[in-house]
Image (cartoon, rainbow, N blue to C red):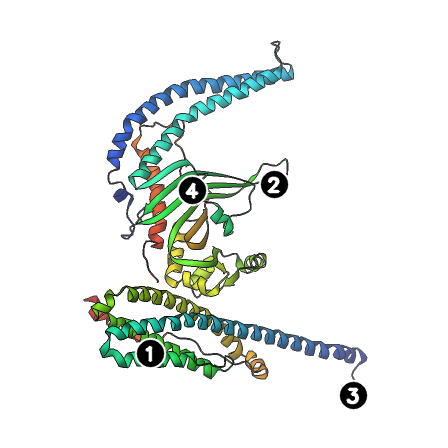
């Protein structure tokens, strides 16, 4: 094998470690940004939980009032109680599957409460109760905060998932054990229903 | 005004009953007009005399003329006479302007005061809505309710001194508005014009309490940058609907617009470098009915802030 000219070998001695150092620095930078994004997503998840806690605190009072008037809806009331217990169960924030189950339970609880307030419209005595009017106003405010927390969480998760799933982030994330997190999506069947344009235009 | 938007009441709609107001104003304005004609004569003469004295003083100074009086005496008396003449010239127009604005504001269910020193500007300073300044002038206090929403307005001019011998420069000129917001803010949320990547970066460094809030609307993010002490609350206040309304407001009111939420209050500072309620010129006839249209249009624009933002709706959207 022919020996490399002296100038070339000296250059290689410097270039190879310099490229390796640059690659390491780049990988470290990406790793730091992944951890920042993951922590931001976890912070946002905590904000969601803080807002969900407000909803939990509201539910017992609403159920107590509803039980007095809504005899025919015992099934729904029991379902809401059970959903509330499910949402309250502790979960590991670092496990995307557990986070997804927790968010799914809170979606179901939101839908259940929405149904309850909709059905309350059929009970004039309940509707006239000052406490339920107050509870409904508080519920609307709490739902506004939950919706805001959901937007914050989804924005943080969107950033994290992009960094985790796009190459070379996918490699670094895999190595660092950072995983994509589930979105907290709105599960409102009314919103998802197709609009009957013909009917609306008539 | 109007712009063909059916949701926006036209000036003509707001003018209902204004003819009666104008008729009620006419005798008073007629008196001020006669006074104006007199003062234009006297004030004009004084101004000409003052300028003449100044020129004579200059002549004394350079030795072109000799009268036995010191040149400084001519300059002092000339300056005072010119100044008196100018004040006399502008006085009827100022009085008429105030009268018309008060009447027009009353017609729209609002109150008007020229002196706005009691405007709660500390809310704006607390929320970092105003640039640093050394002196300020607050004029044209308008307050009352628009579509059931309390509103306070004033026209602000902020000046910043730049060194001992330099004239202070104007750092803000435009309206400050406080209105009620249907939601309560506990933290501090600030909406400022987008400063680009570098501007936003430095702004973030300046503010240690508020963090940048990245919102979903690309159009909103292009126009504004949001900083808040509470990421969730910022999104609670700035729902997609509110973002759209702020963009509509920005399109309607050119200028540097900054917004903050403080408790149940919505604070708006618009640096548009305009005097919203100027006095009529000293040579304008004060019995001209079109004089009433100008303040009316400005007050209608003010009412539009509430209407575009729909602050009257107790909506969670």
Q: What is the residue that sits farthest to the left in this orientation?
A: A202
The chain letter for the residue carrying disc 3 is A
Q: Quadrant of residue B69?
A: top right
Under tag 4, what secondary structure?
strand
Q: Which residue is mark 2?
A: B162
Numbered circle sitting on residue A129: none
Quadrant location of the N terminus of chain A? bottom right
Q: Which residue is mark 1?
A: A80
Sort mark 4 into few (<14), some (14-19) or many (20+) by Cα contacts within 10 Å: many
The chain letter for the residue carrying disc 1 is A
The answer as to whether the residues below labels 3 and 2 share one chain is no
Q: Which residue is mark 3?
A: A2
Q: Which residue is mark 4?
A: B154
Q: Which is more foreground, mark 3 or mark 2?
A: 2
Question: What x and y, as percent, mark residue A141?
Answer: 37, 64
Question: What x and y, as percent, mark residue A138?
Answer: 35, 65
B78 on left or right of B88: right
Q: For the residues marked 3 and 2, what is the alpha-carbon distance in whole angstroms?
A: 73 Å
Q: For the residues marked 2 and 1, what is the alpha-carbon distance in whole angstroms?
A: 66 Å
């Amino acid at each position: 094998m022919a020996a490399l000219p002296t100038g070339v070998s000296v250059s290689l001695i410097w270039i190879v470690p310099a490229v390796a150092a640059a690659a390491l620095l780049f990988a470290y930078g990406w790793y730091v940004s992944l951890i920042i994004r993951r922590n931001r997503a976890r912070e946002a998840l905590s904000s969601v939980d803080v807002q969900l806690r407000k909803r939990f605190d509201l539910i017992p009072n609403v159920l107590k009032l509803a039980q007095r008037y809504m005899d025919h809806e015992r099934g729904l009331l029991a379902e809401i109680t059970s959903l509330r217990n499910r949402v309250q169960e502790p979960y590991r924030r670092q496990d995307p599957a557990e986070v997804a189950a927790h968010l799914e339970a809170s979606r179901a609880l939101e839908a259940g409460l929405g149904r309850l307030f909709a059905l309350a419209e059929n009970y004039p005595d309940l509707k006239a109760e000052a406490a339920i009017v107050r509870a409904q106003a508080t519920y609307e405010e709490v739902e506004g905060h939950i919706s805001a927390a959901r937007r914050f969480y989804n924005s943080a998760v969107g950033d994290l998932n992009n960094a985790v799933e796009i190459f070379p982030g996918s490699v670094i994330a895999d190595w660092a054990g950072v995983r994509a997190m589930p979105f907290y999506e709105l599960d409102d069947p009314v919103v998802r229903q197709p609009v009957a344009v013909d009917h609306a235009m008539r | 005004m109007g712009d063909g938007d059916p949701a926006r009441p036209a000036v003509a709609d707001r003018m209902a009953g204004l003819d009666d107001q104008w008729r009620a104003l006419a005798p008073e304005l007629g008196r001020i007009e006669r006074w104006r004609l007199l003062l234009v004569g006297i004030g004009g003469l004084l101004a000409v005399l003052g300028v003449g004295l100044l020129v004579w003083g200059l002549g004394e100074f350079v030795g072109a003329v000799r009268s036995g009086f010191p040149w400084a005496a001519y300059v002092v008396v000339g300056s005072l006479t010119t100044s008196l003449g100018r004040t006399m010239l502008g006085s009827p127009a100022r009085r008429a302007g105030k009268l018309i604005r008060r009447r027009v504001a009353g017609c729209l269910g609002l109150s008007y005061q020229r002196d706005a020193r009691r405007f709660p500007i500390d809310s704006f300073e607390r929320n970092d809505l105003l640039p640093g300044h050394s002196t300020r002038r607050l004029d044209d206090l308008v307050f009352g309710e628009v579509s059931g929403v309390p509103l306070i307005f004033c026209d602000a001019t902020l000046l910043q001194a730049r060194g001992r011998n330099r004239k202070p420069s104007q750092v803000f000129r435009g309206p400050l508005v406080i209105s009620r917001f249907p939601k309560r803010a506990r933290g501090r949320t600030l909406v400022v014009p987008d400063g680009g990547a570098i501007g936003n970066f430095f702004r973030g460094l300046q503010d240690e309490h508020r963090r940048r809030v990245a919102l979903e609307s690309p159009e909103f993010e292009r126009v504004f940058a949001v900083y808040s002490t509470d990421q969730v609350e910022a999104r609670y206040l700035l729902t997609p609907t509110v973002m759209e309304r702020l963009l509509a407001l920005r399109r309607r009111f050119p200028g540097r617009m900054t917004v903050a939420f403080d408790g149940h209050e919505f604070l708006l500072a618009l640096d548009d470098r305009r005097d919203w309620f100027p006095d009529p010129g000293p040579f304008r006839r004060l019995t001209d009915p079109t004089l009433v249209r100008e303040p009316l249009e400005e007050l209608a624009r003010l009412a539009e802030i509430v209407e575009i933002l729909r602050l009257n709706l107790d909506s969670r959207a």
